[in-house]
Each structure stands twice: as C-alpha cells, then as structure tokens.
C-alpha cells in the first residue's frame, strides 16, 4: 500500500457495503473517515490503523456540521465522499406510518444532501473531488413494500443529477451507484430461500452481488479513471434492472 495523500469519507461505514468500501479505499493508500450512527459497531469495525471514526446521524444538520469540522481539522482536505448511510423498513403502503416515512426520507435523502453540501467547501480547497451517492434498483423500478424506501432512493437519483449539474464547474463530480440484491448480512437475515430463488430467476447472472463488487464500482467513480463521468447512475445488479422479468423456463 502506498500513501497517496487523498482522503475519503464513507458514511454508513460500520458494516456492509460501507465497510467494504472503506477497506477498499485504504488498500489503495487513501486516508479514510468512517462515519456511522452506531458507535459500538463502528468502534468494532476491523480496518487498518489510521482511520478516523466519527459517530454522526447524517439526518441531523448540527451533527453533520460537527463531523465535517473534525474532518477539516484532522485532514485539512476531502477528495471523495460516499453517501452510503441508509435505512430500510419494508411494509405495505397502508401500514407505512408518517414517522417511518419521515425517518427513511431523512436518512436516505436528506443525509446525502447535507453531507454533500458540507463537503463542497472542503473539496474546493484542493480543486475538487468526487461524490458517489448510493441509490438502489428500488429507485429505478417499483416493487412491493417499498413506498418509502423506493421513493427515497428515486430522490437520491434526482439529487445526484442536480448536484452534478451545479457542482461540476467547481471540479466536483457527482454520480450514483444503484445496487441490486447484495449478499449483505441484512439480506441473509430477511431473504428466505423462496425470495432468493425469485431474485435468482430475475437476474441474468443468476446470483446476488457481493459487497466488494459494489465497492469496486464506487472506487471507480471516485478515481481519475472516471474523470469525465458526471451525473450518471451505474446499476450494479447483474442485469436485474435492464432485463425485467426473468423467464425461468427458457433459462432451463
């Protein structure tokens, strides 16, 4: 590993895609800030020495401002921001109460707005940077039980385009990654055998993605290799979104 001097902030970094992304940055020599609301899990996250760990609720403006003040004081720069923090609560539309709706929108949509807004002046100090918002296939196509979650992720996609349009001339590129089904600990817990079969039948690659595969896409969009990519949504989903309904009989 060779130190490159660049700094990346990953929100929702205590586990899953966020933790895999933080580790991938560090393997490339980036200095990394891991931010999460779960202090215990964040403290236990296994990453190389030198990472800055910050406890923060991305939906709270005061906490976001305090976190970025610490980043500025500690590193003095920010080159990449990955807005990964998110929550999900799947339920029928008639059972989605206002508190659930409000919290999902606050974390999943307001969080990336606040963090990117706070990151902008810090990125401008060194001529720009890259932002990757983590959306979802649920923001591109509707499905059952996802009224709040899907709407929040659709909002993230539009927010990405707005941010890209306004920040591009400041040297800040903004893109989104829309993961399909990923084999996270949460998915393993809530996706029973029947659900997994349903997903496999609708995904041309016939499998779930891995946290590392999502992280690799994020790192590409943050890298100089994506220097002319701005305002785009990259679906990392094995072909799930582009194909629609799988035809199991024809596959077999």
Image (cartoon, rainbow, N blue to C red):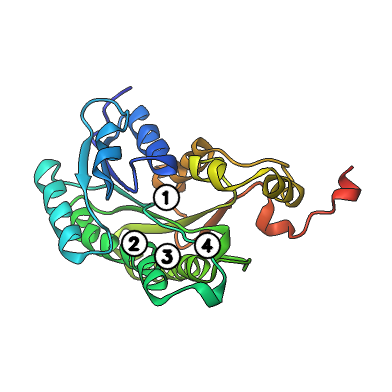
Q: Give the residue number, with chain letter if any, for mark 4.
A: 90
Mark with earlier residue (1, 2): 2
Q: Give the residue number, with chain letter if any, for mark 2.
A: 112
Is label 1 in a helix, a strand or a loop?
Answer: loop
Q: Position of residue 147 (x, y in %)?
A: 53, 71
Q: Position of residue 193 (x, y in %)?
A: 69, 43
Residue 98, compared with residue 4, is above or below; it is: below
Q: Give the residue number, with chain letter if any, for mark 1.
A: 227
Q: Is residue 105 left or right of residue 64?
A: right
4 vs 3, front mark = 4
Q: Looking at the image, which residue sits at the far front?
A: 95
Picture disc at residue 160: 3
Is label 3 in a helix, a strand or a loop?
Answer: helix
Residue in view at x 46 percent, y 40 percent: 215
Q: Is residue 54 left or right of residue 132?
A: left
CA distance for labels 1 and 3: 16 Å
The quarter in which the C terminus is drawn is top right
Residue in view at x 17 percent, y 59 percent: 63
Picture disc at residue 41: none
Q: Position of residue 111 (x, y in %)?
A: 31, 62
Is there a contact, CB below 8 Å, between mark 4 and mark 3? Answer: no
């Amino acid at each position: 590993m060779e130190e490159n001097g660049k700094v990346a902030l990953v929100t929702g970094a205590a586990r899953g895609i966020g933790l895999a992304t933080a580790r991938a940055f560090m393997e490339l020599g980036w200095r990394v800030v891991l931010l999460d609301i779960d202090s215990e899990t964040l403290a236990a996250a296994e990453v190389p020495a030198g990472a800055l760990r910050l406890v923060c609720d991305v939906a709270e403006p005061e906490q976001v401002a305090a976190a970025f003040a610490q980043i500025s004081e500690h590193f003095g720069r920010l080159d990449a921001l990955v807005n990964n923090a998110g929550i999900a609560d799947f339920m029928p539309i008639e059972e989605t109460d206002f508190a659930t709706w409000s919290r999902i929108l606050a974390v999943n949509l307001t969080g990336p707005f606040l963090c990117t807004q706070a990151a902008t002046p810090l990125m401008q100090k060194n001529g720009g940077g890259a932002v990757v918002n983590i959306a979802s296939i649920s923001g591109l196509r509707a499905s059952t039980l996802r009224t709040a979650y899907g709407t929040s992720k659709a909002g993230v996609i539009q927010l990405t385009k707005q941010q890209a349009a306004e920040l591009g001339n400041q040297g800040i590129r903004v893109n989104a990654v829309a993961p399909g089904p990923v084999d996270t600990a949460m998915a393993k817990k809530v996706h029973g055998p029947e659900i997994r079969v349903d997903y496999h039948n609708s995904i041309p690659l016939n499998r779930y993605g891995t946290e590392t595969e999502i992280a690799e896409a994020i790192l590409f969009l943050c890298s100089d290799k994506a220097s002319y990519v701005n305002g785009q949504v990259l679906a990392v989903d094995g072909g799930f979104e582009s194909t629609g309904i799988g035809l199991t009989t024809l596959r077999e």
